[in-house]
């Protein structure tokens, strides 16, 4: 068996890389049995040789020369867990063109420039696997790429960012505002010191691009994904959701609309009865709707060194098996080549809470503002507050452009004292 030994280089030894190294070392015998040949770690590229690490890496394996490591002609498999665009892209391209198969967790790179990587893998006739790029340990890309390859996926609705889910969950359970909940997430290590990528939805948008590409066999990049984060979500929004027996979640939504693909990330109210509403704390979940299978939900830890390393190792075993049998897994599937629907044409529902004068004709005027913009109202709730009233209107599905024009219209009306909450509504009847 030893003559078939597969040599692995790991690029990056942060929280994921160190767990990959640990699993490769601790489970070497089981991995060899599962793959059919020993999988030998031959190098770990790091930025600094003397950095503190979660695992002890033998000094002779460490190198700061990542380019030199991927250029070694005895390396069969490269694991890229550096993250970011460069040097990760150049290293992956060099690994593929040098004949290695690649496993990566790099969602930002795949969402920005996936096609370049897929084309390089196809040209080199090597595997490029990336299960860990979306929702950490949760097997979701392989089910989309393989298990559902015979079905027609129509919608993917995901909570794919644990930091924002932790913050929104905290706001829901404690009534805290965004800043207070973010501070707690930072104190507990769930949010980064600079939380922009998570709270402004960039991380989720990259994952949405990857999910949409796989689900709909088309090329969708991060710049195709409409993105709104959670930093504007207020305690009043969350309270308003509670009053409708709903909860606010940051959703990544990828759907087929006619021949087009819609991909968006934004906070939305979903009914507490929806399976995604029960996703608490920093957990992730992806809800998939397909024509034949119906509704499927994938749930689990979406981040963290060890869970993400589990997904990396799963890919590594598959890629290693392919390598031994001199074959490759499925490459990119973009044959459907669907265009991306502009956000304004996407159909959504809105929840709008307004402080208005409490007198005759106000409700009719508010209803007219919706009607004038061709938006049908589903429910209206009114609460008197002395001279004022609060109106909570939930619309039926309409184009996002019509809904945002309705809100702009409401803001200009004299009888409307304030628009206190505007949020999209998902997961219920249209
Ligand atoms: N920062 C991400 C999250 C995990 O909070 O879920 C890595 O994508």
Image (spheres, grey):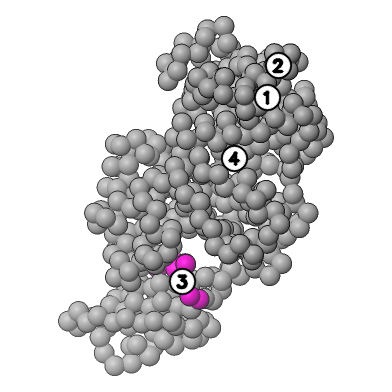
Q: Callout 4 environment at 10 Å: few (<14), some (14 to 19), or many (20+)? A: many
Instruction: For the residues labelled 3 and 4, say whether their Cβ atoms are less than 8 Å apart.
Output: no
The residue positioned 68% from the left and 57% from the top of the image is: 216
| Residue 223 shows in the view | no
Residue on which disc 1 sits: 36
Residue on which disc 2 sits: 1
Instruction: For the residues labelled 1 and 4, say whether their Cβ atoms are less than 8 Å apart.
Output: no
Secondary structure of the residue carrying tag 2 is: loop
Nearer the observer: mark 2 or 3; the answer is 2
Q: Decide if residue 236 is on the left or right side of residue 259.
A: left
Q: Nearer the viewer, residue 289 or 411?
A: 289
Question: What range of the chain is rendered magenta?
Answer: 422-430
Mark 2 residue's CB less than 8 Å from ligand 1: no
Residue on which disc 4 sits: 131
* Residue 15 image position (x, y, % from top left): 46, 27
Spatial separation of the CA atoms under disc 2 and disc 3? 55 Å
Of the residues under marks 3 and 1, which one precedes in the sequence?
1
The residue positioned 76% from the left and 15% from the top of the image is: 73
The residue positioned 71% from the left and 57% from the top of the image is: 150
Instruction: For the residues labelled 1 and 2, say whether their Cβ atoms are less than 8 Å apart.
Output: yes
Q: Decide if residue 114 is on the left or right side of residue 382.
A: right
User: Where the N terminus falls, by quadrant?
Assistant: top right
Q: Nearer the viewer, residue 57 or 248?
A: 57
Instruction: For the residues labelled 2 and 4, say whether their Cβ atoms are less than 8 Å apart.
Output: no
* Residue 218 image position (x, y, % from top left): 71, 54
Spatial separation of the CA atoms under disc 3 and disc 4? 30 Å
Residue at the extreme bottom of the image, as rendered: 360
Of the residues under marks 2 and 4, which one precedes in the sequence?
2
Is 180 drawn above or below residue 254 in the view shown? above
Secondary structure of the residue carrying tag 3 is: loop
* Disc sitting over residue 428 in the figure: 3
Spatial separation of the CA atoms under disc 1 and disc 2? 7 Å
């Amino acid at each position: 068996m030893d003559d078939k030994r597969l040599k692995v280089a790991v690029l990056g030894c942060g929280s994921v890389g160190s767990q990959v190294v640990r699993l490769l070392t601790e489970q070497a015998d089981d991995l060899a049995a599962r793959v059919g040949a020993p999988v030998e770690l031959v190098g770990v590229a790091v930025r600094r040789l003397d950095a503190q690490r979660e695992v002890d890496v033998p000094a002779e394996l460490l190198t700061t020369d990542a380019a030199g490591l991927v250029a070694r002609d005895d390396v069969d498999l490269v694991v890229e867990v550096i993250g970011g665009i460069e040097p990760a892209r150049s290293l992956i391209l060099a690994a593929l063109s040098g004949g290695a198969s690649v496993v990566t967790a790099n969602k930002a790179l795949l969402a920005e420039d996936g096609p370049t990587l897929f084309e390089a893998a196809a040209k080199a006739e090597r595997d490029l696997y990336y299960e860990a790029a979306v929702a950490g340990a949760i097997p979701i890309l392989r089910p989309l790429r393989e298990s559902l390859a015979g079905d027609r996926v129509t919608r993917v609705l995901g909570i794919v960012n644990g930091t924002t889910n932790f913050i929104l969950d905290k706001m829901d359970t404690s009534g805290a505002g965004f800043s207070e909940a973010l501070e707690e997430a930072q104190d507990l290590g769930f949010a980064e010191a600079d939380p922009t990528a998570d709270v402004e939805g960039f991380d989720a948008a990259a994952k949405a691009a990857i999910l949409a590409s796989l689900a709909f066999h088309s090329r969708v990049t991060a710049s195709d994904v409409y993105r709104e984060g959670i930093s504007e979500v207020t305690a009043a929004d969350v309270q308003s959701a509670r009053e409708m027996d709903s909860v606010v979640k940051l959703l990544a939504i990828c759907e087929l609309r006619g021949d087009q693909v819609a991909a968006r990330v934004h906070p939305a109210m979903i009914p507490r009865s929806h399976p995604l509403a029960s996703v608490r704390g920093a957990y992730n979940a992806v809800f998939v709707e397909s024509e034949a299978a119906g509704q499927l939900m994938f749930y689990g830890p979406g981040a963290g060194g060890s869970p993400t390393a589990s997904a990396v190792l799963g890919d590594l075993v598959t890629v290693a098996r392919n390598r031994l049998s001199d074959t490759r897994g499925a490459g990119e599937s973009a044959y459907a080549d669907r265009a991306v629907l502009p956000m304004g044409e996407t159909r959504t529902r809105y929840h709008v809470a307004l402080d208005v004068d409490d007198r005759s004709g106000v409700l009719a005027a508010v209803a007219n503002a919706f009607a004038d913009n061709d938006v049908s109202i589903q429910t209206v709730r009114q609460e008197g507050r002395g001279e004022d009233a609060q109106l909570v209107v939930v619309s039926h599905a309409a184009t996002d452009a019509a809904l945002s024009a309705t809100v702009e219209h409401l803001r200009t009306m004299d009888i409307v004292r304030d628009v206190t909450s505007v949020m999209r509504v998902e997961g219920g009847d249209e």
